[in-house]
Amino acid sequence: MLIPAYNEEKVIVRTIRSVLNSDYANLHVIVIDDGSSDSTYDITRESYAAEIAAGHIQVLTKPNSGKAAALNFALDRLTEEFYVGIDADTVIAPDAISKLIPHFEDPLIGAVAGNAKVGNRVNLWTRWQALEYITSQNFERRALDLFNVVTVVPEPSAHGAPRPSKPPAATPSTPSPKTPTSP
């Protein structure tokens, strides 16, 4: 589980607690503090010291450079075959991860997005947000069907993907992108 966090001191403990309540066995949580100016990093380490010591949670910190860079920072340190990523202000259902991961038994599946629910209230605002999520997910499905690409993974839903493989090192027969080739 990857959780990038920037200035999330008010919600990070609740988010991690929801992950630890997962029914998925052998879960490893990585929280990436993306240069927060608040106490996100310290609160996480203090609140989950026992879980960190047991190796269930890892807390990384790096200078602020955005969510994508924080996720890439963690991906470079993954040893697991699959990962699930959520926002630091997301609370997941106990069965969310166990429902996402089995889809990857099919080698044609490259990513899975969870069902986003906006808060526990139903009002005009949450209905508009739900409509936005449904529309964006349908857009993504069409982009995948037409162009075989995923433009973004809809947020704030939990999502999972196989761990990206690192490109092979350049060999003399394969010019490096930095090496100019003659026309």
Image: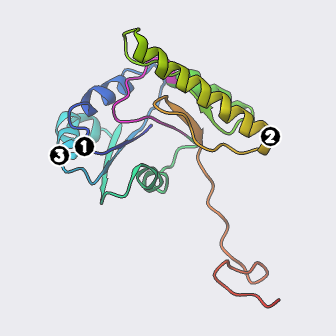
Secondary structure beneath dot 2 equals helix
- Determine which residue is flagged by label 3: 38
Image location (x, y in percent) of residue 146: 80, 40
Secondary structure beneath dot 1 equals loop
Look at 48% across and 24% down and name the residue there.
Answer: 24
Looking at numbered disc 1 in the image, what kind of residue is underneath it?
Asn
User: Going from the N terminus, do you reach mark 1 or mark 3 first?
Assistant: 1
1 or 2: mark nearer the eye: 2
Q: Is residue 175 above or below residue 135?
A: below
What main secondary structure does the magenta stretch of the protein show? loop
Magenta-colored span: 83-96
Image location (x, y in percent) of residue 23: 46, 19
User: Going from the N terminus, do you reach mark 2 or mark 3 first?
Assistant: 3
Q: Quadrant of residue 94?
A: top left
Looking at numbered disc 2 in the image, what kind of residue is underneath it?
Leu
Image location (x, y in percent) of residue 52: 28, 40
Q: Which mark is residue 7?
A: 1
Look at 28% across and 35% down and name the residue there.
Answer: 51
Q: Residues within 10 Å of mark 3 (few under 14, many from 20)?
A: few
Q: Quadrant of the C terminus?
A: bottom right
Specify whether residue 84 is painted magenta.
Answer: yes
2 or 3: mark nearer the eye: 2
Q: Give yes or no for contact between labels 1 and 3 (Cβ–Cβ under 8 Å).
A: yes
Q: Is residue 101 visible?
A: no
For the view shown, which residue lies furthest in the bottom direction?
Answer: 182
Q: Is residue 63 above or below residue 68?
A: below
Q: Is residue 2 left or right of residue 16?
A: right
Q: Is residue 85 above or below residue 179?
A: above
Q: Quadrant of residue 45?
A: top left
Q: Which mark is residue 146?
A: 2
